[in-house]
């Protein structure tokens, strides 16, 4: 079935059609059948006319015709395709090398710019910096207000208050040691028949909280310089 030209495509005939078909086949430089050439020309040359033109061009030596079964293909005669002189090929190779070097340089610049852009995007925005600066200034003002009494020489804790604090500290230290002694005695009794591992498991199951590192550091401080060394309630006597 012949290709129907589109409404906006001029239908070519005669020498104009022949020139169009030959120009297309040479430009594409690959085998084509009449149907493909007519279709690729958007119907500017009908299929029957395209077939006649291709055969005629093959007879003139402009194209080479190859037949496979009932189908014929046509390709431009390679002997008539213009070739570039060696000087022009060398010049083009020089241009190609220059373009490749330029492309390499541009690619490197693009890579560096991309890395720089990534770093910039990781930085806080102006709005975020403004908020952070305001928060910092607010914190500085708060700390200055807390330090102001010291700068003015005001007494923050009176002698009576200091004496009371020391008295309370001694009181609660004695109470702490007394309760710990009671617990150690009680614990020693109920775990006497248990192994250290079982005693530790029981302590964990009962949710008993022993002294932490902070308590141990406090006990070794000056406040406990004369206090007796406490035993480990989980250590079994054998």
Image (spheres, grey):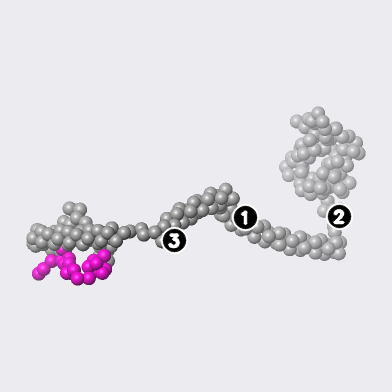
- Magenta residues, dominant SS class: loop
Element assignment for label 1: helix
Q: Are marks 1 and 3 in contact (CB under 8 Å)?
A: no
Q: Tell me, yes or no, whether the highlighted magenta stretch contains residue 101.
A: no
Q: Residue at x 60, y 55 (%)?
A: 120
Quadrant location of the N terminus? top right
Instruction: Measure the C-alpha gap from mark 3 to mark 2.
Output: 96 Å
Of mark 3 and mark 2, the one earlier in the sequence is: 2
Q: Nearer the viewer, residue 158 or 224?
A: 158
Q: Which mark identifies residue 82?
A: 2
Give the percent coordinates (x, y) of residue 224: 22, 68
Q: Nearer the viewer, residue 190 or 225?
A: 225
Give the percent coordinates (x, y) of residue 22: 85, 44
Q: Which mark identifies residue 117?
A: 1
Element assignment for label 2: loop
Task: Give the residue pinned by disc 3.
Answer: 151
Residue 65 visible (yes or no): no
Is residue 223 positioned above or below 139 on the image? below
Mark in front: 3 vs 2: 3
Q: Which residues are magenta?
A: 218-238
Of mark 2 and mark 1, the one earlier in the sequence is: 2
Residue sitting farthest toward the right: 15
Residue sitting farthest toward the top: 7
* Residue 46, picture quadrant: top right
């Amino acid at each position: 079935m012949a290709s129907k030209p589109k409404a906006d495509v001029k239908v070519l005939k005669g020498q104009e059609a022949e020139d169009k078909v030959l120009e297309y086949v040479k430009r594409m430089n690959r085998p084509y059948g009449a149907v493909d050439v007519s279709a690729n020309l958007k119907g500017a040359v009908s299929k029957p006319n395209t077939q006649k033109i291709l055969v005629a061009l093959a007879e003139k030596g402009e194209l080479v015709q190859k037949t496979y079964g009932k189908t014929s293909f046509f390709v431009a005669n390679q002997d008539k395709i213009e070739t570039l002189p060696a000087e022009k090929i060398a010049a083009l190779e020089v241009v190609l090398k220059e373009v490749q070097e330029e492309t390499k340089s541009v690619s490197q610049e693009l890579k560096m710019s991309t890395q720089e852009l990534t770093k910039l995007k990781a930085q806080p925005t102006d709005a975020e910096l403004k908020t952070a600066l305001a928060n910092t200034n607010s914190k500085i003002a708060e700390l200055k207000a807390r330090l102001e009494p010291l700068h003015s020489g005001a007494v923050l804790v009176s002698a009576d208050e200091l004496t009371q604090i020391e008295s309370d500290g001694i009181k609660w230290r004695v109470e702490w040691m007394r309760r710990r002694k009671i617990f150690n005695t009680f614990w020693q009794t109920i775990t006497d028949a248990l192994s250290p591992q079982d005693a530790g498991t029981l302590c964990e199951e009962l949710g008993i909280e022993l002294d932490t590192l902070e308590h141990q550091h406090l006990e070794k401080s000056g406040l406990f310089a004369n206090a007796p060394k406490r035993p480990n309630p989980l250590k079994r006597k054998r």
